[in-house]
Image (tube, rainbow, N blue to C red):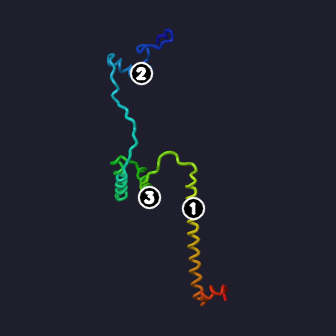
Amino acid sequence: MKEQVNGSAPSGAERSEAARSEAERSAVADGGRTMPEPEVVVRAKRRQFTADYKKRILTEADSARESGATGAMLRREGLYSSHLTHWRQERDRGLIPLPRGPKPKNDPLFEEVRKLKRQNSQLTDRLARAELIIDVQKKVSLLLGISLAAIDSDGSNS
């Protein structure tokens, strides 16, 4: 290889085959004329599916009874099994897609709702136990012949 003069880069003919770019190699092979790049790069676009389409696909997937029918349907539609998983979750929530992006850190209303739901379930459980105990007390009083009205009016057991 020839030495560089004044720090300039060697011309295309002086560089090795590996050092030349694809465009330079094709220009030399074509006798000096260059060809435009035929490949068009398309930017990927996120697919969006309508609620009706999701319902139709889920119905078809849930009704598939034969072995491999769901996989064949997914290949035909160009979908992944994870689509079905997410769409079933959306269906269970009422087909309301969750917003994309980061979730809010500390939403005070969310915490309050969560706390109230937990308290409501605890109170519901306590009420069910109390009703069960009252039913048992009524049955015991009937078996022993003790009138509950007499106990209530006197305020005592005898």
Q: Earlier in the sequence, mark 3 or mark 1?
A: 3
Q: Mark 1 points at which residue?
A: 116
Tell me whether circle 3 and circle 1 mark residues in contact (CB < 8 Å).
no
Say if 28 sits above or below 74 in the image.
above
Q: Which amino acid does label 1 sit on?
A: Leu
Q: Mark 3 points at which residue?
A: 92
Which residue is at a point 39% across and 36% down the rendered structure image?
A: 43
The residue at the far front in this view is: 153
The residue at the far top in this view is: 5
Q: What residue type is labelled 2?
A: Ser
Where does the image place residue 72, in percent across and percent down from the top left? 34, 51
Front-most of residues 112 and 44 = 112
Give the quadrant of the C terminus.
bottom right
Tag 2: Cα neighbours inside 10 Å, few (<14), some, or many (≥20)?
few
Q: Which of marks 2 and 1 is in front?
A: 1
Tag of residue 21: 2
Tell me whether circle 2 and circle 3 mark residues in contact (CB < 8 Å).
no
Spatial CA distance of label 2 from label 3 is 55 Å
Q: Which of marks 2 and 3 is nearer the N terminus?
A: 2
Spatial CA distance of label 2 from label 1 is 67 Å
Where does the image place residue 56, in percent across and percent down from the top left? 34, 55
Question: Which image quarter: residue 47?
Answer: top left
